[in-house]
Image: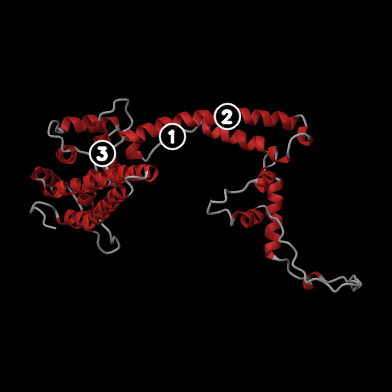
Amino acid sequence: MKFRSYVPQAVRVSTDLWLEGKGYKQNGLNSALAKAEADLLRIEQQRDKWANDETRSNQLRIEQANATNHRDDLAADVACLQRLVHDPRMQPAYAKLANLPNVTDDDLSGFIHAAWAARIDYTAYRDAMTDAADMVRKVAAAAGVLAELLSRADSTGWHDYLPAECFDLRSLLKKTEHAPADRNFQMWPDMRAFILGEAEPAREAPGEAGVSSKSVRVEFVPLSHAERRDPEAETRNMLRYAWYTAPSMAKIIAAMQRETLSCIPSEPSFIAQAVNSRKKAPKAAYLRAFGTLLRDEHGFDLEASVREAMATTATVVLNDANDSVCTADVSSALTRIGA
């Protein structure tokens, strides 16, 4: 790939890696985009083939919509990276970065990666956090009701009237299976037996019919000559004992309620900062995420020169002909993240 003369060598190397893929990173974004376009073309051809089959046609329509969104996202990622190394508006930003004290190659490539990585749609994350907070409240309420009922049943001695699975986690695990389609369906029974400390079935050779057992002779053996216990048997015994000391189901579900009551759903720090506002302003969300990545992931001191470079870079990344980014926008966004 050809680069403009003012693009630092470190940025050239890292951008070429992200786009083309080399060495340990065999497949870059360009390869992923080509595959996405091929997949979309294949689905479009399938739709033509199954145009008279309503059920299959509807399935393919959904697949086409998902494939289109995937292709468009990759195309936007590629276009953004290409702007960062080809758009002449980036020249002053690179000049600001190159003149920072003690700037390293990692700093330069990290700045561009942060600028690119922060360019995502935060609407879905904002909605997900709202839904998660609502779900946490509902789980806490339901767990509280169940814990109270089980505690009452436990304290009144109703163990003979309710199944053991209501009081004992070990019993509940014995009766709980995966769905047949689950990849752990076959593995779980053996793992469960080990976790619960259950002994393996005896594997003795069958004796001959009509032959009486041998007589038993009691012999006292010195401790120094005693056989060592089977380590696996010791492990099973310890596990079995540990399960008998486990808290009751009521206590376990009460702990679930306690933890969900104190839970605040969160995203990774840069996403959390981006959605940390009631206003759904894409530019401000992007700048908060960009600043958080630079400060927390790449160790930047967000001083004046960096803020100016951020403003120029954000203008190129967002690429909105009707709304450029100024240093005041950056400073306002960074104030929200405590920078």
Q: Between marks 3 and 1, how big is the CA–CA gap?
A: 22 Å
Q: Quadrant of residue 294?
A: top left
What residue is pinned by disc 3?
A: 291
Residue 338: percent from left, percent from top: 30, 32
| Amino acid type, callout 3 | Gly
| Amino acid type, callout 2 | Ala
Residue 112: percent from left, percent from top: 21, 47
Query: Which-is-in-front pick, marks 3 and 1?
Result: 1
Horizontal arrangement in the rendering, residue 317 relative to residue 168 (left or right) = left
- Asked if the residues shown at circle 3 and circle 1 are in contact, with their CB atoms under 8 angstroms apart, the answer is no
What residue is pinned by disc 1?
A: 265
Q: Please state which of residues 150 and 60 is positioned toward the viewer in this rendering.
A: 60
Horizontal arrangement in the rendering, residue 311 relative to residue 42 (left or right) = left
Element class at badge 2:
helix
Residue 111 in view: no
Q: Which residue in the rendered view is the most extreme toward the front?
A: 52
Q: Please state which of residues 112 and 199 is positioned toward the viewer in this rendering.
A: 199
Query: Which-is-in-front pick, marks 2 and 1?
Result: 2
